[in-house]
Amino acid sequence: MDQRRAGWEGEFPGDGPPGAGLGAEGREISLREGMDAPGAGSIASDSATEGAEPAAPAAAGGAGASRFRAEALGGGPAPRGDSTPEAPPPAPGRPQTASPVVGHAPRASFAWGTPGARAGSTSLQGRGLAHRRNLSRAEMRRSQSSQELRGALGADGLPRVKVAICAMSKKSQSKPMRAILERLRATGEFEIEVFSDDLILGQPQEAWPECDCLVSFFSSGFPLAKAVAYAARVRPYLINDLAVQADLLDRRRVYRRLAEVGIPVPKHIVVSRDGLAPGEDPPGFVEEEDFVELGGQRILKPFVEKPVSGEDHNIHIYYPHSMGGGVKKLFRKIANKSAEFDADHPGTVRRDGSYIYEAFMTTGGTDVKVYTVGPRYAHAEARKSPVVDGKVLRTAEGKEVRFPVLLSPSEKEIARIVSLAFQQKVCGFDLLRSDKGRSYVCDVNGWSFVKSSTKYYDDCAGILR
């Protein structure tokens, strides 16, 4: 059976918060059990995808399944009761198909309050078709000629799903994005429209073209509030939740959410100066020569000082006098430089805003970046940490040197929960592997792509489809 027509492709194995799902027999399974199952696991660079999609359950689904099947195939809501719904009438010029097969119950999907999210498949094709089939087929049958109808249908005779890419052109026209969109277009199942910067910035959201599925994410200069309003009005299926992306811009909210879902984060304190006079400390904050303290919780040097804004990458590391003192200043890469050491810095913390202070962790000189595509796929790469010497290692082609790494079972579980907790299917986050054998999440970046990996482009397009 065509899995896409049956409504199985890309659905989550359960309905509820991270940590539990439903197996094929209807029993609850834990994240750990799912991760330890044969074929489950992360991929590293160009290795295999993280586990295959499970086969559809064979148990009869009853009237609920009948209604789901009828709606998924475009026939509209089925009548209640045990009666089998009639097959939808064929579209003009399209041969009669068999009646829907009743008796396979769809797996439930996680519902996280995403604007426009509905029960059913989490893929572009599965969710988009369910979203627009009832209206589109009826309209096409009434108003379009057979020739026009054939142009509006994909190779499988089903309506194409209209996908909108709403992001700043620097991101929407990037090599990874273009590579993935080319693969989606090649299926013949999608109509993809990329919004221009002039449209996004210069036109009200009411003038933006409507879509079935929306790929939209924040970057510098992007009007996130306008995109949220568009999604609330049009109610498309969202690949990445837009409202939650506002939380990703504040590291305080990110750490709070990570703690709520049980993800390990470095020991830290949050010094918020919102509403305070410039240079004023909040009550209970103490700074001494070799530590800072808030509310009785002390962070010893060396510690990391992070601005609470997720867009501010000017991070400082303060060293104690026993290590010679001084401050290492990290920043976005400039040519081949990403950090510099200030030996003459007095060692006093910044007081021009709100900051997070967290214990410095030794990680063997590497940082690990994890890229998810949904909760079942994770690609991990490591690079030389800027803390080592601030010099960026580059290949002969000028790209930063990165190498694939394998994730442990606990790190796979972390990747799964991060994707679900922040409602970001395509997501990147930073992982610290401490020398004590435990991994911690120190930042969640939202929409992130692996660069220069054909295998990743294939996998990402296949999962999104």
Image: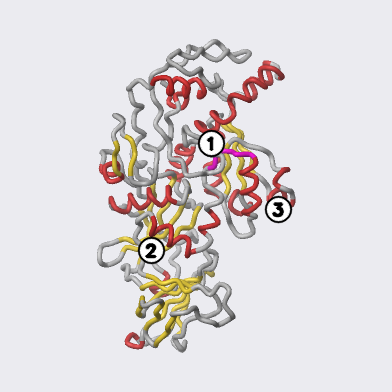
According to the image, label 2 marks what residue? 367
According to the image, label 3 marks what residue? 201
Amino acid at the residue labelled 3: Leu
| Labels 3 and 1 touching (C-beta < 8 A) | no
Quadrant into which the N terminus falls: top left
> Between residues 335 and 36, which one lies in front from this camera angle?
36
From the top left corner, tell me how far across and down residue 364 is, in percent. 31, 68
- Which residues are the magenta region? 234-238
- The question of residue 236 being in magenta is answered with yes
| Labels 2 and 3 touching (C-beta < 8 A) | no
Badge 2: residue crowd in 10 Å (few <14, some 14–19, many ≥20): some
Badge 1: residue crowd in 10 Å (few <14, some 14–19, many ≥20): many
- The question of residue 136 being in magenta is answered with no
> Between residues 407 and 360, which one lies in front from this camera angle?
360
Q: Which is more foreground, mark 3 or mark 1?
A: 3
According to the image, label 1 marks what residue? 184
> Between residues 432 and 120, which one lies in front from this camera angle?
120
Amino acid at the residue labelled 2: Asp
The kind of secondary structure element at disc 2 is strand
The kind of secondary structure element at disc 3 is helix
Q: What's the distance in space between the residues labelled 2 and 1, CA to CA? A: 32 Å
The kind of secondary structure element at disc 1 is helix
Task: Tell me which corner region of the image, top left, top right, bottom left or bottom right, holds residue 178.
Answer: top right
Q: Which is more foreground, mark 2 or mark 3?
A: 3
Badge 3: residue crowd in 10 Å (few <14, some 14–19, many ≥20): some
Q: What's the distance in space between the residues labelled 3 and 1, CA to CA? A: 26 Å
The tag earlier along the polypeptide, 3 or 1, is 1
